[in-house]
Amino acid sequence: MTDKFSSLDTLVRGFADPVHDAQACFRVLLDALARPGTVGSIDAAFDDDVLRRWPAAAFGAMLTLVDFSTPIWLQQPDEALAQAIRFHTDAPLAQTPEAAAFAYVSDAAALPSPDAFALGTPEAPQGSTTLIVRVDALEGGRPLTLSGPGIQSSVRVGPIGIADAFWHARAALAALAPCGIDCYLVCGRSVTGIPRTTRVELN
Amino acid sequence: MKESSSDIALERRRWLAQLARAPRAALESALDAVCAGGPLPAFEWLRAPQTGLAMVRGRIGGTGDPFNAGEATVTRAVLRLKSDDDAGAVGIAYQLGRDKRRAELAALADAMLQTTSWSDAVREQLLVPLVRVLDEERRERAANTASSRVDFYTMVRGE
């Protein structure tokens, strides 16, 4: 009977304490980009059906960062996630990656080339797309060496599931500074940031 | 189901408008009566009551352009019933003012109206008396306004 009244029956719940959870998440996300390669943890409480569907770090990051002024692009159609984003954040869904301020990439193996996303303009580099990429693990994959601002000398990470071609294409964007894309790699509750200023070497 | 979904949507629209105007005391006493002294149905928040501002827009005459009349304080809430047989009914409330308990009760009433087990009782105990009160208030206001009515007319000046 109830399905006749609204389509919200299956809507998942967002933050239990919207203000404080979003502030705590924001701090973690900020630190992740300020200290590239370090692993932060998003500890906000979510219902089980959220944790079953998406990494908590990705869901928390979307609830925290996305709002009505930032269109988000979903790599794979996901009605439940689209509904949650519309309800909890009022954000519109972008039809193409270059129209999006945020992109949720649930299948890292099929990650589009970085120049498929908005890179910003020299006058407004903040207009670029921020990627939230779900990876199978943050350690144990292809070893990468990160260096650049926010890193003392260099730091090694090993995300599983991102093709080398993506890192090569991303390196080619360095010439366009200050334009470029910022990435969050998420796995479960863990999140690591790779901002546009970080040099990624494959070894 | 006899009714088509558009009929139900229309009906819900009507009762949402009525609940938006319902005073807190009326909601509280009616829901208590429906539950016959027992606890109100259990629910979980999808959006806990929150107060914010909404721009109220107006339009003068049938052809005037819309303009911003000013901001109004609005409290909204969304909840979902937890009880076994009616699990999933989602109740919504938007109300003027900053009374969070009132928004909670209105959302709860909206959710209960969508269930088979509560619907008739809520209709009878809450909506019917509420509509009577709201109609009465509207009539009274209209009568008060009508008493100060001024008819403007221009006399035709003779040639």
Image (spheres, coloured by chain):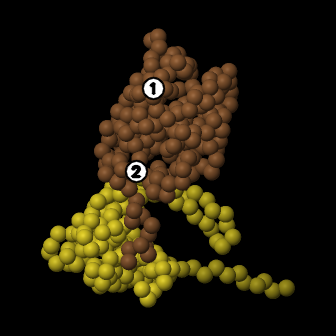
Chain colours: A brown, B yellow
Neighbourhood count class around disc 1 (C-alpha, 10 Å): few under 14, some 14–19, many 20 upward: some
> Which quadrant would the N terminus of chain A be assigned to in this image?
bottom left
Q: Which mark is residue A53?
A: 2
Residue A141 sits above or below residue B4 on the image: above
The image shows residue A186 at horizontal and vertical percentages of 43, 36
The answer for which chain carries disc 2 is: A
The image shows residue B39 at horizontal and vertical percentages of 17, 69
**Lower sequence index among marks 1 and 2:** 2
Neighbourhood count class around disc 2 (C-alpha, 10 Å): few under 14, some 14–19, many 20 upward: few
Question: What residue lies at 35% left-to-right and 48% top-to-bottom?
Answer: A51
Question: What residue lies at 61% left-to-right and 39% top-to-bottom?
Answer: A112
Secondary structure beneath dot 1 equals loop
The image shows residue A48 at horizontal and vertical percentages of 31, 51
Q: Is residue A39 left or right of residue A116?
A: left
The answer for which chain carries disc 1 is: A
- Residue most extreme to the top: A153
Question: What residue lies at 38% left-to-right and 56% top-to-bottom?
Answer: A12
- Tell which of A34 and A53 is nearer to you: A53
The image shows residue B58 at horizontal and vertical percentages of 58, 64
- Tell which of B149 and A91 is nearer to you: A91
The image quarter in which residue B15 lies: bottom left
User: At label 2, which amino acid type do we have?
Assistant: Arg
The residue pinned by badge 1 equals A158
Q: Is residue B57 left or right of residue B39?
A: right
The image quarter in which residue A99 lies: top right
